Image (tube, rainbow, N blue to C red):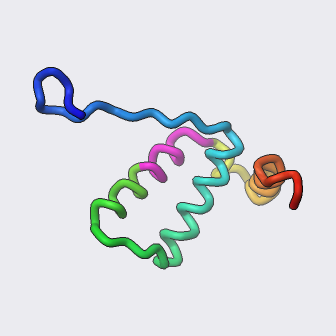
Amino acid sequence: MTDDSGDEPDGVSIELSHDEALVLFEWLAHRDEAGDLPLEDQAEQRVLWDIHAGLESTLEEPFRPDYAKLLAAARNRVRDATE
């Protein structure tokens, strides 16, 4: 979709809980470091990098010394109760 001028695409918002954002941030960081995402086009990589950068600029936890503990707690809260 484009705006009325036809020049810019409309934005899309996705709402995540803080825990979901932290888990997604870590997953994106890990996948990027491992380089193991099967991408068909460089545009897909660009989108994932942009999402990762947006999360990085929003979250404080990745820069805290107790990050591993905070991430584990977030994963536990996000994880399905049956696991």
User: Which residue occupies 45% across, 49% down?
Assistant: 51
Q: Depth check: 76 or 67 in front?
A: 76
Quarter of the picture holding the N terminus: top left
**In the displayed image of the protein, which residue is found farthest to the top?**
4
Tell me residue 5's x, y (percent): 11, 23
Q: Is residue 66 left or right of residue 45?
A: right
Total numbered labels = 0
Q: Which residues are magenta?
A: 51-59
Q: Depth check: 4 or 65 in front?
A: 4
Rendered view: 72 above or below 9: below
The answer to whether residue 64 is magenta is no
Q: Main secondary structure of the magenta part?
A: helix
Quarter of the picture holding the C terminus: bottom right
The answer to whether residue 56 is magenta is yes
Tell me residue 34's x, y (percent): 52, 77
Q: Depth check: 3 or 67 in front?
A: 3
Rendered view: 51 above or below 34: above
Residue 8 occupies quadrant: top left
Residue 66 visible to an observer of this rendering: no
Tell me residue 17's x, y (percent): 67, 37
User: Which residue occupies 71% across, 50% down?
Assistant: 64
Residue 54 visible to an observer of this rendering: yes
Residue 19 occupies quadrant: top right
**In the displayed image of the protein, which residue is found farthest to the right?**
82
Q: Is residue 23 left or right of residue 66?
A: left
Rendered view: 18 above or below 36: above
User: Which residue occupies 12% across, 32% down?
Assistant: 7
Q: Is residue 53 left or right of residue 17?
A: left
User: Which residue occupies 28% across, 66% down?
Assistant: 42
